[in-house]
Image (cartoon, rainbow, N blue to C red):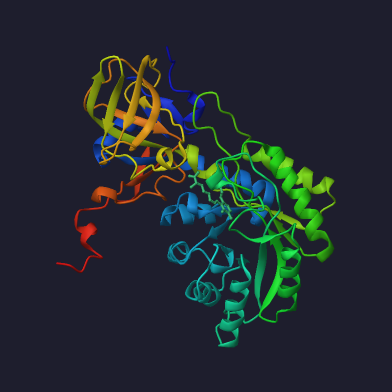
Amino acid sequence: MAGPVPWHLLPENSSVGSKGQLMIAGCDTLELAAEFGTPVFAYDEEHLRARCREAVAAFGSHATYATKAFLCGAMAKLAHEEGMSLDVATGGELHLALAAGVPADRLVMHGNNKSVAELAMALEAGVGRIVVDAFEELDRIEQLVAGGTTNPNEAPQKVLLRVTPGVEAHTHEFISTGQDDSKFGFTVSTGVAAAAVERAKASESVELVGIHAHIGSQVFRAESFAEAVSVLGAFAQPFGLPELVIGGGLGVAYVEGEEAPTISQWSKIVLDGAAAAGITASIGVEPGRSIAAAAAVTLYTVGVRKDLAGIRTYVAVDGGMSDNPRPVLYGSGYESCLARAVEAPRPLPARVVGKHCESGDLLVRDGHLPDDLALDDILATPVTGAYGHSMGSNYNKVLRPPVVFCRDGDARLVVRRETYDDLLLTDLGF
Ligand code: LLP
């Protein structure tokens, strides 16, 4: 018999309301569901801020929030207010961060295969750094500069080179990136990365300020980061560059029994590793998931319960792979609980599924819920603050959910729910 949902998976400022319901930062989740409808992403704003501050305390302005994990205007402003720089990986992320008022010099332009248009946008905006992923990107920057596209301060654009250090992170194949067989960066072991350094140093269009690597995502083993630091340090040291960035990737606990290092523990291992390796460059990081994931729960309404005799119980909710594709993409596990009874034991084995037209559309494969689960109950899935909203889709023309920031008993709508008319906006067929 499964116990209550593990408390540590809930946002930091969660509490139990007078009727046993889940409260987030003083907001009653049942009231959130009633006011904003379901599905809805409910964030604990102070949790987000605390994680940003934790990263900044260790790495200063070299703590860069990876916006791909979760991005909207309010989040971009929040990360900036708390002192983080922002990593944007496409023209779209760049556009949003600039529209939110984040100063361009606090932005780091990422991405593999950046287009001429994206690089031009970055140069013209005056982004602080561009992380170059391939020789073609250096060619494009040089061509743009030769054609008169420069950053507003007209100094050569500061760049880092992304390298693959040959460190295998223990994570899912699709989100592991530091090994040699990778589409990302310049390979260290073959000498290509060293050649890229020479090429960038010789270029008059850019100023090479550092080396960058990202070994993977959802990495629990802090030692992997220490290995990456020492391998990178050994590579970068002879070039005497002032910056070394080791990317993001710190894992978070999603289900019962999982445990991940905190940002502070991670930063200590990284910084101690750098000091032990004699690295004098400043160390930068780009956490995404560890900032945003555990800050949110998604609230759904239960619409169907099917008890298939001798097989299993299916619980269908009003969202699914369009608001959380991670279970389908990576086989990721989640927990679930009833918002009205957050401390209730969960003896009922149940598969929580969505409303999309395919069998693979599941949110919690092997979940547990209270026995008295009924129609119209509000179900909460914790740790959905990263790579849910940002990887969401309109599959089956399902509307993207709203995002609510909860703080001190106030719920602030920061992204409204899509409307059916929003679905027609880009369609010229009418
Ligand atoms: N920096 C770079 C260059 C990255 O590519 C990434 C993530 C990060 C930082 C942030 O990593 P984080 O701290 O969030 O692990 N959609 C997948 C994760 C893909 C991560 C891609 N790059 C998932 O839902 O697990």
Tell me, yes or no, if residue 398 can be seen here.
Answer: no
The residue located at (68%, 47%) in the rendering is 58
Quadrant occupied by the N terminus? top left
Q: Residue furthest bottom?
A: 147
Residue drawn at x 46%, y 52% as measured from the top left: 75
Q: Residue furthest left?
A: 430
Seen in the picture, residue 137 relative to 292 is either above or below; the reply is below
The residue lying at 43 percent from left, 63 percent from top is: 96
Residue 237: which quarter of the image?
Answer: bottom right
| 119 relative to 419, above or below | below
Q: Is 35 situated left or right of 206 in this image?
A: left
Res. 408 image quadrant: top left
Give the quadrant of residue 147.
bottom right
The spot of residue 414 in percent (x, y) is: 36, 51
Q: Quadrant of the C terminus?
A: bottom left
Q: In the picture shown, does residue 374 fall above or below 117? A: above
